Image (cartoon, rainbow, N blue to C red):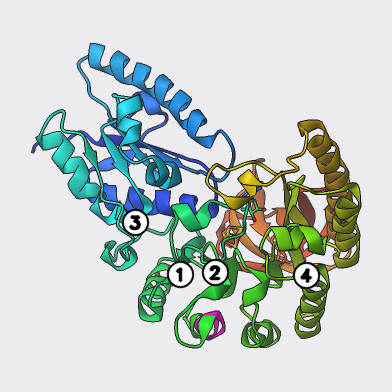
């Protein structure tokens, strides 16, 4: 008997959005057949992938500074007779291309989001031709269906990409430039992947897309959701992130009719002032957003809303900012993501007059966050006393504890036996904090 070949070690550092989290998992899946297992940290890795994000200011500079550290680890490994391949993926790779290898010669591979299916081949090529440095072609071709069919599920929930790119061109945002035009994956491929995940024990899928509700397959996202709801074993469906302009009647109706579609919707509004929304090129007003949420809540009265907000957009006056606060009060958010406007070179808003001082942005962000925090706490507190179905995902931090999610995406901690992981079980909610709920099993489980 010979020992199996020593495993190669892979370390992926992921920045940014859930799309990148998903892409990182897929890269790990693609590299597994080449013998790559996960490393604890970059210093132990034969292959380090930085999966980068470009959405915020100085993102590129942060990547270069991280690469400086990793280069040092590469040199340390080389001194011990080991090698390290460094790859840069994601949106900074897309935006900077080969420039990355000029600025940081320790980088072996630059690979844009459209070229991940080539990763195993590119890695093999860098290894064969020692020292050959490669930049994958960044053509906006459909990458999805060239990815291998096998995907190893990791737990009882999974992300599933259905759409990529964005045609909306909000004036502050780099996504339409870095991720390119909208592209939707064929429904058949999505369903096949969903069935495969369900067969591996996945109970909940979150459909991903930069602009997921613009899904372009026949019948749109509503039809896809209805088909996914038929997949044996899939009990929960979520999707993120949505644009208000693509929230069509069929999708709203699905929220009232499809039991598996969870009552939590991430629907960014960005601002509450029509003047600012227009300058952002958002294609909705505060009023149209409020009416939309009203229609959604008519279909699904317990819908929990989450939002994204940008404070300090160029030209934002105090009165504009107050309109954002007013809108937040009127909607009542269950959770939210708020950002200070950050100037992204190449986007229209970066060239606008009226850029605001950092202190003004800080002060507005603090006021907005105070309001959003209060709403989140109030939303969580409103569930105390209720019994909610919880999907248990993993053992909790303390022995004998389980951790799961409510339909509204709240983390729920409960004392209970491990065999409940992967099951949806009624839990009586007894306590609430800002980030989670605590409860007790509502039924006796041996
Ligand atoms: N500045 C601040 N926030 C931004 N976002 C996108 N671009 C910018 C920017 N230039 C935020 C938006 C978006 C979320 C993913 O990131 O709120 O919905
Ligand atoms: Fe960016 Fe706007 Fe597209 Fe969202 S909808 S990805 S904010 S351009």
Q: Which residue is mark 1?
A: 162
Tell me how far mark 2 sits from mark 1, CA to CA. Answer: 7 Å
> Circle 4 sits in a helix, a strand or a loop, which is it?
loop
Tag 1 near tag 4, CB within 8 Å = no
Lower position in the chain sequence, tag 2 or tag 4? 2
Membership of 223 in magenta stretch: yes
Question: Residue 426: horizontal and vertical position, in percent?
Answer: 73, 69
Is 310 left, or right, of 189 in this rendering? right
In depth, the one of 49 and 399 nearer the eye is 49
Image mark count = 4
Quick check: is the Cβ at mark 1 less than 8 Å away from ligand 2? no
In 3D space, how far apart are the residues under numbered discs 3 and 4 (Cα atoms)?
34 Å
Q: Which mark is residue 114?
A: 3
Sequence-first tag of 3 and 2: 3
Task: Answer whether residue 384 is visible to the viewer in this image.
Answer: no
Which residue lies at the image location 74% right of the left edge and 61% below the top edge?
277
Query: Whole-percent x and y of residue 271?
Result: 77, 58
The image quadrant of residue 274 is: bottom right
Q: Disc 2 or disc 4, which is closer to the eye?
A: 4
Dot label at residue 285: 4
The percent position of residue 288, horizontal first and vertical second, equals 78, 75
Q: Residues within 10 Å of mark 2 (few under 14, many from 20)?
A: many
Query: Position of 12 compared to 444: left or right?
Result: left
The CA distance from mark 3 to mark 2 is: 17 Å
Q: Which residue is mark 2?
A: 212
Q: Magenta segment: does it hold 222?
A: yes
Give, as a single range, the part of the protein colored magenta.
221-226
Q: Is residue 26 above or below residue 79?
A: below
Label 3: state its secondary structure: helix
Q: In the picture provided, is 103 more to the left or to the right than 360?
A: left
């Amino acid at each position: 008997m010979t020992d199996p070949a020593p495993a190669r070690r892979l370390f992926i550092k992921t920045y940014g959005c859930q799309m990148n989290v998903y892409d990182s998992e897929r890269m790990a899946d693609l590299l597994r057949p080449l013998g790559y297992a996960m490393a604890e940290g970059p210093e132990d890795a034969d292959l380090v992938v930085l999966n980068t994000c470009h959405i915020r200011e100085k993102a590129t500079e942060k990547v270069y500074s991280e690469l400086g550290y990793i280069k040092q680890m590469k040199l340390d490994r080389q001194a011990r007779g080991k090698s390290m391949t460094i790859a840069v993926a994601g949106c900074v790779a897309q935006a900077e291309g080969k420039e990355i290898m000029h600025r940081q010669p320790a980088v072996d591979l630059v690979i844009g989001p459209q070229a991940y299916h080539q990763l195993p081949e590119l890695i093999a090529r860098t290894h064969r031709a020692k020292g050959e440095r490669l930049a994958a072609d960044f053509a906006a071709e459909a990458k999805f269906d060239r990815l291998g069919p096998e995907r190893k599920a990791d737990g009882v929930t999974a992300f599933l990409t259905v759409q990529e790119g964005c045609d909306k061109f909000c004036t502050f945002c780099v996504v339409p430039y870095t991720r390119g035009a909208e592209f939707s994956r064929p429904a058949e491929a999505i369903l096949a992947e969903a069935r495969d995940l369900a067969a591996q024990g996945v109970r909940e899928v979150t459909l991903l897309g930069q602009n997921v509700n613009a899904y372009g397959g026949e019948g749109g996202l509503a039809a896809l959701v209805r088909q996914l709801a038929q997949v044996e074993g899939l009990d929960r469906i979520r999707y993120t992130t949505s644009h208000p302009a693509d929230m069509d009647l069929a999708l709203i109706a699905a929220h009232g009719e499809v039991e598996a579609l969870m009552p939590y919707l991430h629907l960014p509004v960005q601002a509450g002032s029509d003047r600012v929304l227009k300058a952002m090129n958002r294609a909705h007003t505060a009023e149209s957003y409020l009416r939309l949420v009203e229609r959604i809540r008519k279909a699904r009265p317990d819908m929990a809303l989450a939002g994204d907000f940008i404070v300090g957009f160029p030209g934002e006056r105090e009165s504009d900012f107050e309109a954002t606060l007013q809108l937040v009060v009127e909607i009542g958010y269950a959770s939210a993501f708020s950002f200070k406007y950050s100037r992204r070179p190449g986007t229209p808003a970066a060239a606008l007059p009226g850029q605001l001082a950092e202190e003004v942005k800080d002060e507005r962000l603090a006021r907005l966050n105070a309001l959003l925090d209060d709403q989140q706490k109030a939303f969580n507190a409103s569930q105390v006393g209720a019994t909610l179905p919880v999907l248990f995902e993993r053992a909790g931090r303390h022995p004998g504890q389980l951790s799961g999610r409510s339909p509204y995406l709240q983390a729920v901690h409960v004392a209970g036996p491990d065999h409940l992981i992967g099951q949806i079980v009624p839990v009586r909610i007894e306590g609430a904090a800002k980030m989670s709920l605590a409860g007790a099993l509502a039924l006796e489980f041996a």
